[in-house]
Image: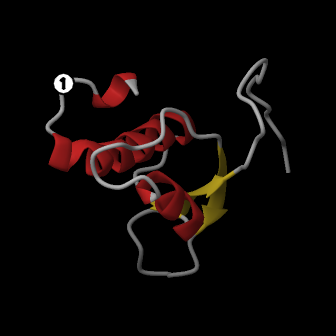
Amino acid sequence: AKRTHKTTFKSKTPKAIKEIKKFAETAMGTKDVRISTDVNKFVWSQGVRNPPKRIRVRLSRKRNEDEDADEKLYTLVEHVQVASFKGLETETIDA
């Protein structure tokens, strides 16, 4: 919600998507960020003017299969459904 304050109605949800990408980029340190369709559908579920206030996401750094890509790694953003956002903390999982 705070990342889309003072934004015109028609650009609120597109800005929310950009902010999710920016967050993933800084958290995981990769320029290539791919958003899953689940995340996209959830953010757009209430229309362009009213994106959800919060979203829980799982970020995973994956190897790029495309050999001629600029970067070796990309970040995949997946949606995690939660009943409540109370008391959640960041969980780091080493694979």
14 left or right, relative to 33? left
Q: Position of residue 38 (x, y in %)?
A: 58, 64
Q: Position of residue 30 (x, y in %)?
A: 47, 49
* Residue under pointer 1: 6
Q: Which quarter of the figure has residue 7?
A: top left
Residue placed furthest toward the top: 87
Q: Residue at x 41, y 47 (%)?
A: 21
Q: Residue at x 79, y 32 (%)?
A: 91
* Residue 32 visible in the picture: no
| Residue type at tag 1 | Lys
Q: Residue at x 35, y 43 (%)?
A: 50
Front-lying residue, 27 or 41: 41
Front-lying residue, 93 or 51: 51
Secondary structure at badge 1 equals: loop
Front-lying residue, 5 or 66: 5
Say few, some or many: other residues with alpha carbon within 10 Å of mark 1 (under 14 / 14 to 19 / 20 or more): few
